[in-house]
Amino acid sequence: MLRWTRAWRLPREGLGPHGPSFARVPVAPSSSSGGRGGAEPRPLPLSYRLLDGEAALPAVVFLHGLFGSKTNFNSIAKILAQQTGRRVLTVDARNHGDSPHSPDMSYEIMSQDLQDLLPQLGLVPCVVVGHSMGGKTAMLLALQRPELVERLIAVDISPVESTGVSHFATYVAAMRAINIADELPRSRARKLADEQLSSVIQRQESYLGPTLFLLGGNSQFVHPSHHPEIMRLFPRAQMQTVPNAGHWIHADRPQDFIAAIRGFLV
């Protein structure tokens, strides 16, 4: 089975608006993933730091960007825990910081890591705040397991494929491979075609929880043309821009970043 999540490519920090992207169209998983003859990758025990707080309130979970670590949010996590009384979790993604390394690296498996960790810590449902690569992971987690995410904050990243890569050839090849007997009624033939194409063209569900897209005023990672797809996948999405901030909003304008999160938690 082809899996659409495999097409979510890892962003490279600082490459501009066409660097980070993910596609809804699947690509075939590698048959030699991790050198295990195509075995499914397994979740890793991620390194984390958990600040204590009120168990009755949803915890706040921070996911860093590519080449970052949980320490990127140390100061912000402390302040937010003090100001809100919530538990605050910072996590190292696999192959980052103090978390284990693995040849398996995709948004799918990073989402699986969190699906394993968050319930173990008793933190679900929680508020997930993800920057760049972490924002992509957070969005996928919310789409796959909405019951784990009380609300979502995507920091200067969108779910839109913006690299200009066309998957038209994939569609054509899939349609040519459809095998339907000529004598079947049209309604039955259409149903069979849908079933055979479903492994290539996945119908993506929406996340219906509260969602904030927090954008840097000086950043071009999220373009206005992305908004329709954002609203399709996240119908309750709000857009908020932090003036005089680039892609690293939490570093450029930490107080405004904290204020935006607190405002969204109310």
Image (tube, helix red, strand yellow):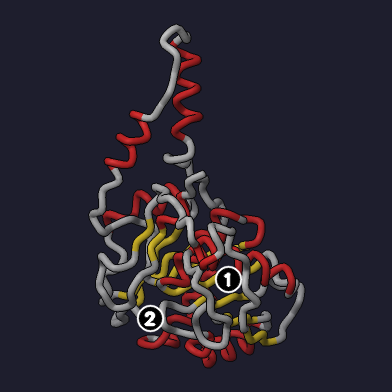
Q: Are marks 1 and 2 in contact (CB under 8 Å)?
A: no
Quarter of the image that includes the C terminus? bottom right
Whether residue 200 is visible: yes
**What SS does tag 2 mark?**
helix
Whether residue 210 is visible: no
Front tag of 1 and 2: 2
Instruction: Give, as a three-letter code, the residue at label 1.
Output: Leu
| Residue 12 picture location, percent across and down | 33, 74
- The residue singled out by tag 1 in the image is 265
- Asked if 86 appears above or below 127 in the picture, the reply is below
Residue at 26%, 77% (x, y): give it.
Answer: 218
Instruction: Give, as a three-letter code, the residue at label 2.
Output: Ile
Which sits in the foreground, 147 or 33? 33
- The residue singled out by tag 2 in the image is 249
| Residue 253 picture location, percent across and down | 38, 86
In the displayed structure image, the side of residue 133 where residue 70 appears, left or right: right
Which callout, 1 or 2, points at the residue further toward the start of the chain? 2
Q: How crowded is mark 2: few (under 14 residues within 10 Å), some or many (20 or more)?
A: many
In the displayed structure image, the side of residue 261 where residue 49 appears, left or right: right
Q: From mark 1 to mark 2, how far is it between C-alphas?
A: 18 Å
Which sits in the foreground, 157 or 254? 157
Residue at 51%, 59% (x, y): give it.
Answer: 140
Which sits in the foreground, 216 or 123? 123
Quadrant assignment, res 41: bottom right
**What SS does tag 1 mark?**
helix
Residue at 48%, 64% (x, y): give it.
Answer: 107
In the displayed structure image, the side of residue 150 where residue 73 appears, left or right: left
- Asked if 202 appears above or below 259 in the picture, the reply is above
